Amino acid sequence: MSRYDGIDQWALRHHGRIEYAETVHHIIPTVDDETMFFRESNLIPVSRASHDEIHALYKTDKVATQEELKQIITQKEAGGI
């Protein structure tokens, strides 16, 4: 959370809104791969509303949503937005 200043990265990048993150979303869920649970590259801070939105998107296109989340993390690591 501190790495992202407590800001919801999904709302910022996807909707252009600044919101406080309340939780961390696992891009690859634990049920799919337990080894990814603590990997920083698999974690993205989000608000409760964003977390619910992401889970809804996983039901329609999980792979594309995961790729978008990974891109957000990659951009941040590269010093992007």
Image: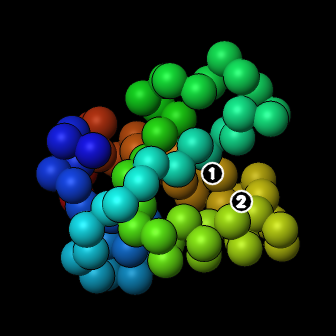
Based on the displayed image, in which of its 4 quarters is residue 28 positioned? top right
Residue ID for mark 2: 64
* Residue furthest top in the image: 35
Q: x, y (%) of residue 4? A: 23, 48
Q: Nearer the viewer, residue 48 or 68?
A: 48
**Residue found 25% across the figure and 68% down from its top:** 20
- The quadrant of the image that shows the C terminus is bottom left
Q: Which residue is mark 1?
A: 67
Residue at 40% of width from left, 82% of height from top? 15
Q: Secondary structure at mark 2?
A: helix
Q: Amino acid at mark 2?
A: Ala
Residue 39: image location, x then y, percent: 49, 24
Q: Residues within 10 Å of mark 1 (few under 14, many from 20)?
A: few
Percent position (x, y) of residue 58?
76, 63
- Does residue 5 lie above or below 53 as drawn? above
Q: Amino acid at mark 1?
A: Glu
